[in-house]
Image: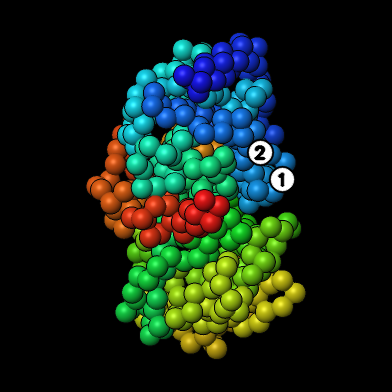
Amino acid sequence: MKTSALGRIALATGITALTTGLIPTTAHADDATVERKVLPVLVEFTDSSFQHPDKVKESTPDTYFGAKKDSLASFFSELSRGRYKVVPVVDDQYVGPVKLPMAASCDHGEINTLTQKALAEQGLVRGEDYDSLSMVFPAQKTGCSWAGLGSVPGPYTWINLYGTASGLGVVGHEFGHNLGLGHQMRSVCTDGNLVDCKENGTSAKSMMGGGGPAMGISAPEMIRAGWLDDSEAVEVAESGTYELRSLHGEGSGVRALDIPMGEDRLVVEYRHAAGSFDQNLEGVHAYRVPKGNYGSSSLIDLTEANKTAGNDAPAEADAITSLKDVASKVSLAVTSSGDGGVTVRVSLNGEDLSDVADVPEETAAPAPEHTGTDTDAGDGLPDGAEAKSGGQEKVTGSEGSEAGGSENLAATGGDSGTLLLAGGGVALVAAGACALSLMRRRRRA
Ligand SMILES: [Zn+2]
């Protein structure tokens, strides 16, 4: 069969490249930099091949490692401000197509097992030669309800590819899961006291909450990823007035306030156009972090409005100007804004905000050591990184239930206990980024 022959040729070429083409590992630029060796593998089934293999092969290096801003490497480099580098493993930057000895199916575990077996036969071993495995396969016969699937956290992504390329909306989102991020939901609390909050859709403030790559990720997710240090994500230990700069963009300053709120945390950010991010988003937003699990935060929306990257609502439509949680006696108010920054007054003990003293940022309480450490070398965080996790392997029930509508799936390949979250597809209300790409596909079709 023609496609099989193509596959074999490609595989043979791949083997040739592999014997000579392993890219040597470079040392970390500094302790704060993570270098992630990512291996995209094009896989085909006994009864299903890529319809346009040459175009898939051409697009894959661009999608993962290209110089343009819409590559995974560029995206994470800008978002992390150089802390997270996505690097290729082999000269061709991808392997395949590899023909797996299985009929087309959505059995992600079997796809993973057989792909790793095929790679091992080529001398490529996960954890040694590559850190992260991204399996890209033709969607036509798999029957998957999702466009992408990612382990949370973990090293695996599955891309159920229609057409010739998956955009950053799918690939970036699934790699976000690998960083330990679940889907970011939206909690509407219009009574203003955070008591009667109702979950209503996704945050739209993050690519993990249906915002697409243009929204980057939110402050609690930046903390979870280890991309804000203690001077950038300040733990608020006493009432006071704090200056916040924009969450994204170059420069220094405080980018997030991390406030105790009962058993949970309240993370506050200021979103403002910066680089590739937040061109249509302006204002202060707040998130509830359940029991310190920064990968499972939800937007606290005090309005019925929901500013997304794509809708016509004003950029500041659902920004907050003040917030009060009666139960934990926490309140805050935005007291000024301008010049790319805002001033936020915070009361931790029920004290009237007008009585909170204006204290310069420098005299704010020094941030204590972040609680929670992450020793899982497989989740893409630097060794010993002070990533705030606090149970990063747990995601909320709603997130878990989105994995194809089934129970929490155990990942294959030795990461039992790791959850998988799918993006895109009919059952997946939260994966706006992936749903977006599905819509684009339909238009092309
Ligand atoms: Zn997802």
Q: Position of residue 86 (x, y in %)?
A: 61, 37
Residue at image location 52% in from the left, 34% down from the top: 51
State the residue in front, 420 or 62: 62
Q: Quadrant of residue 269?
A: bottom right
Say the numbered circle drawn on residue 62.
Answer: 2
> Quick one: SS at disc 2?
helix
Examine the rendered structure and indicate whether residue 286 appears above or below residue 51.
below
Residue type, mark 1 in image: Lys
Examine the rendered structure and indicate whether residue 137 appears above or below residue 402.
above
Say the numbered circle drawn on residue 96.
Answer: none
Q: Quadrant of residue 256?
A: bottom right
Q: Position of residue 236 (x, y in %)?
A: 52, 66
For label 1, being within 8 Å of ligand 1 is answered no
* Count of numbered marks: 2
For label 2, being within 8 Å of ligand 1 is answered no
The extreme left residue here reads: 407
Return the disc, 2 or 1, that comes first in the chain's sequence.
2
Do tag 2 and tag 1 residues touch (Cβ < 8 Å)? Answer: yes
Question: Counting other residues with Cα less than 10 Å from the Cα at mark 2, is it few (<14), some (14-19), or many (20 or more)?
Answer: some
Q: Position of residue 238 (x, y in %)?
A: 51, 71
> Quick one: SS at disc 1?
loop
Residue type, mark 2 in image: Asp
Examine the rendered structure and indicate whether residue 242 appears above or below residue 57.
below
Say the numbered circle drawn on residue 68.
Answer: 1
- Spatial separation of the CA atoms under disc 2 and disc 1: 8 Å
Left or right placement of residue 240 versus residue 397 in this view:
right
